[in-house]
Amino acid sequence: ICMCWPCGIGDASWLYAKLKHLPALLGREVRVSMPDAEPQRGHQLLERLPGVTWAGYEPGWRNEDLFQCAMKPDVGLEAFAPGSWLAVEVNRWLERGRKLADWLPWLPTDYHFHIPTTEEEREVGAILLMGLPKPRLALYTSNRDKDRYPGWALWSAAEWVEAASPFASVALLGAEYDRDRTEEVAALLRARGVPVALCVGRSLGTALEVMRGCDAFLSYPSGIGILANVLRVPGVMLLPKMLSGLAVAYADPEDLKSGAYRAWVTPRAEELKE
């Protein structure tokens, strides 16, 4: 069978936590494609996950097209028939505050699935963290472009720095297009004498290895913030008010209960320090 999933890393993470079990149940290959929308990030995760085969981007398709014809959330195993092509998304379910475990409830939910990385990615991650004192914070700030969109401009560079101040060092993560805000925050941290590592524009696997080597994470709404819970790295992902339903929806309920992971709607930087 072939499925088309939304094109984000976080979107793919949510679906994989459930649908990774299908190949064993069906006894056949599961291929996954994504809409041909920017930025094309989801393949960075799918290409390394066991049990699914990356099938490329669907030319001319957008996430909105997928949502219009997406599979209903109450289907059974029979919906995944041999030779079928299915548009699948769980975003709208989660954004309404519904639990990931309750979507296709006949499938288990693997909140902490294994994400393979290469030996080179592990070595580079270790090198980037070398000499950084503990406790270390993995920090993802996104980019300045988000400031132009209503509801998405959450914190200034100074606020990110303030929230990171309890930590002895900071490892900043980001794609190449996040470099502007990331380097701005890095410069402010260095001005305070905080040791900093930059993991910008590197592979997803390298970023995950850096995050694994940190004691906590703090993140703008993103796939990397969602994967932090998959890796069991404690911390906080910020949420805008428009996505407040996600706060209780996708992460491991035990981690939410214990406070090890929190998706926090529009907190102030000083609240995190407390």
Image (tube, rainbow, N blue to C red):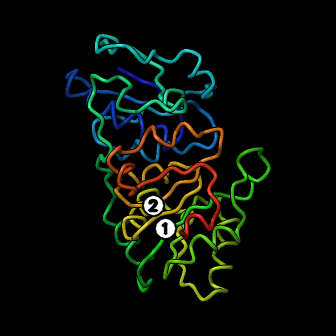
Relative to 73, is 9 above or below?
below
Relative to 199, is 255 above or below?
above
Tag 2 residue: 235
Q: Amino acid at mark 1?
A: Ala
Tag 1 residue: 138
Front residue of 248/109: it is 248
Mark 1: which secondary structure? strand
Mark 2: which secondary structure? strand
Q: Quadrant of the C terminus?
A: bottom right
Mark 2 in CB contact with mark 1 (< 8 angstroms): yes
Marking on residue 92:
none
Residue 97 in the image, given as x and y percentages of width and height: 50, 32
Q: Amino acid at mark 2?
A: Gly
Question: 10 Å neighbourhood of mark 1: few (<14), some, or many (≥20)?
Answer: many
Residue 80 in the image, given as x and y percentages of width and height: 33, 15
Q: Quadrant of residue 60?
A: top right
Q: Quadrant of residue 37?
A: top right
Q: Quadrant of residue 92?
A: top right
- Of the residues under marks 2 and 1, which one precedes in the sequence? 1
Q: Quadrant of the N terminus?
A: top left
- Disc 2 from disc 1: Cα separation: 9 Å
